Image (tube, rainbow, N blue to C red):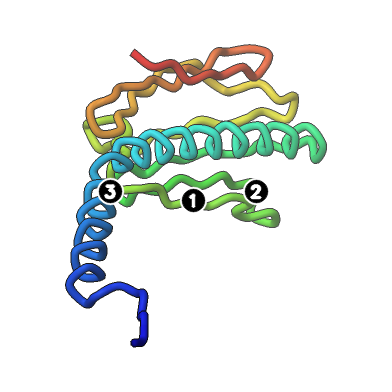
Amino acid sequence: MINEKGFTLLEMMVALSIFMILLSLSFLVFKPQMEMVKGNTFFTQLQADLFYAQSYALSHQMRMYVQFTPSKKEYAIKGDIATGEIIYRKYDETIVINEDRVSFNFSILPNGNMSKFATYPFSIDEKKYTLTIQIGQGRFYVTKW
């Protein structure tokens, strides 16, 4: 008598079905986490880009222009005609900047300071943020409210 040990086809199908159900439920759990990561990634990249533009302005003693175009979901940082664009980024559709969809811009002076102070509203899904640019010393920060 041969003693064969193993799983039947029915047992394997039941196990596979349970695995697939658990896998499909995990996407519902991880989706909010992905949205949070998307927002954090955007602001981290934006801050890094602005710091880079400040250091570029200081090291090359030139004015850098920062322009957001919310209708196209992009922003760019440019120098003079010879330098051209040093940073160009497209961002996710879920990120809404300046709800009136009008582009906004400011510049970073050769001494690293910002040309104007302002507060720009951002929203990612239902969460609201503001980018605050302070005049003098080239300071800016992002707050959640």
Q: CA distance from mark 3 to mark 1?
A: 28 Å
Relative to residue 131, is residue 96 depicted above or below? below
Task: Identify which residue is drawn at 36% across, 86% down.
Answer: 2
Which residue is disc 2 drawn over? 80
Task: Identify which residue is drawn at 30% across, 36% down.
Answer: 32
User: Mark 3, mark 2: which one is toward the viewer?
Assistant: 3
| Along the viewing direction, whichever of 136 and 37 lies nearer the viewer | 37
Q: CA distance from mark 1 to mark 2?
A: 18 Å
Query: Which three-letter amino acid code belongs to the residue tagged 1?
Result: Arg
- Disc 3, disc 2: CB below 8 Å? no
Q: How many neighbours does mark 1 have within 10 angstroms: few (below 14), some (14-19), or many (20 or more)? A: few
Q: Quadrant of residue 21?
A: bottom left
State which tag comes first along the sequence, 3 or 2.
3
Task: Identify which residue is drawn at 72% across, 35% down.
Answer: 57
State which tag comes first along the sequence, 3 or 1.
3
- Under tag 3, what secondary structure? helix
Q: Which mark is residue 27?
A: 3
Query: Which three-letter amino acid code belongs to the residue tagged 3?
Result: Phe
Query: Which three-letter amino acid code belongs to the residue tagged 2?
Result: Asp
Specify whether 67 is left or right of 126. right
Specify whether 126 is left or right of 134. left
| Along the viewing direction, whichever of 83 and 9 lies nearer the viewer | 9
User: Mark 1, mark 2: which one is toward the viewer?
Assistant: 1
User: Mark 3, mark 1: which one is toward the viewer?
Assistant: 3
Quadrant occupied by the C terminus? top left
Q: Which mark is residue 89?
A: 1
Quadrant occupied by the N terminus? bottom left
Residue closest to the far front: 1
